[in-house]
Image (spheres, rainbow, N blue to C red):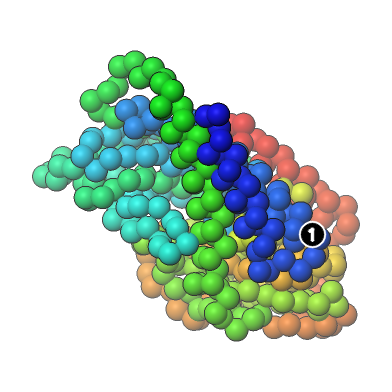
Amino acid sequence: MLTDPLAESIAEAEKLVAGAPHIRTEQDLLEGYQYLAGGILATVHAAWATEREHPSFIQGTGPYMKMGLDNPDTLYFGARISDDEEYVVTGRRGTTVDLSFQVLTGNYTDANVPGSVNAFDDRAFDIEPDGTFRITFGPEAANGRPNHFTLAPGSTQLVVREVYSDWNQQRGTIRIERADTAGTPTTPLTTQNVERRFARAGSSLVSRVQTWLKFPEWFYLNLPVNTMTPPRSTPGGLTTQFSSAGHYDLRDDQAMIITVPRSDAPYQSFQLGSMWYISLDYVGHQTSLNVAQSQVDPDGMIRLVVCARNPGITNWIDTIGHARGYLQFRWQRVNRELTAVDGPSVAVVDHDRIADSLPFHHNNVISPQDFANRIATRRAAVADRMLG
């Protein structure tokens, strides 16, 4: 059967998930199967929705098909490209805080991080007063040609990130065309083509699981537990982004208090991730906060309280019962080097000492109804941007 390669790969990926070294509880395993389901959705979609002759942007990561410690504030779009073709990217800039582009060579694997040959945000090209833009990518040098970006040899992917701060900001639009095939019909399917797509989806699924089980070992798990790094340029070539990373291990009667200055960068955020290296549920729980959503204390500091039980604090970051996981700050559209002074400090305290550990505790208290309203706002905003 044509689907045999996909079925075999799903079985192989299931074994990888079931044998993941971090599994300790039934919740860990069940979330692994949920993660596997998202991977199947994403890789089958990518195999059938992408064409080299007629490329299009697709979402490879979202609330139901997560990977790579996805940012709750970000919509991710990707297109397959070739280094010897020219592409025209058009769209309308939304009101989101950041819109960035990155050209990659190769793919993420369990042995390799793809090369980043170009990365820039929308400050690098002209945008019309009505928000529309047109940029080109191709093998030729720009030679004064406006809004043109040269594709380096080996370029295979164009990734676009649209980043929200206020979740009520409006998303933009974006599309891609290959210059020499615009207006031509799609190539008819063949048996060989169909078989190849199912096989590609299967191999991509196995690679996806292997890669993101390995990735944290490179960048997180070698760090001391319950600490975070100073801000550093984000691995992977994102030239206008800095990040601070760590992993936590907390008992139910403990809390982590993270203190960080409100940054002068246009975008600043914090999130938790599960041991599957994906975001925790950010729709029905407050597992992330960006600067627009955070309460800032009178001294200009943001104090986040990470714990399993609701402490009645506005900046509570809910672990949703995950005793272990990943910690991540991001700063974007930066125009200077960030240093340790810009980064977080971390303290682990007993849960009943949270109030004593917050110098402005009286400002941080929130009622159950007001916190429920925050969750309702999150649900509505995610629903709006996913349909927009």
Q: Which residue is mark 1?
A: 27
Would residue 7 be found to the left or right of residue 359 on screen?
left
Would residue 72 be found to the left or right of residue 189 on screen?
right
- Compared to residue 377, the image places residue 248 above or below, namely below
- Compared to residue 294, the image places residue 373 above or below, namely above
* Residue type, label 1: Gln
Residue shown at 52% from the left, 29% from the top: 2
Would residue 150 be found to the left or right of residue 215 on screen?
left
Q: Position of residue 154 (x, y in %)?
A: 26, 50
- Compared to residue 380, the image places residue 319 above or below, namely below
Camera-nearest residue between 323 and 141: 323
Q: Position of residue 187 (x, y in %)?
A: 35, 19
Q: Quadrant of residue 50?
A: top left
Specify the quadrant that holds the C terminus: top right
Q: Can residue 185 be seen by looking at this rendering?
A: yes
Residue shown at 34% from the left, 32% from the top: 52
User: What is the residue that sits farthest to the left in this orientation?
Assistant: 143
Residue shown at 86% from the left, 78% from the top: 253
Q: Quadrant of residue 289?
A: bottom right
Q: Can residue 319 be seen by looking at this rendering?
A: no
Q: Position of residue 208 (x, y in %)?
A: 52, 52
User: What is the residue that sits farthest to the front in this orientation?
Assistant: 1
Circle 1 — which element?
helix
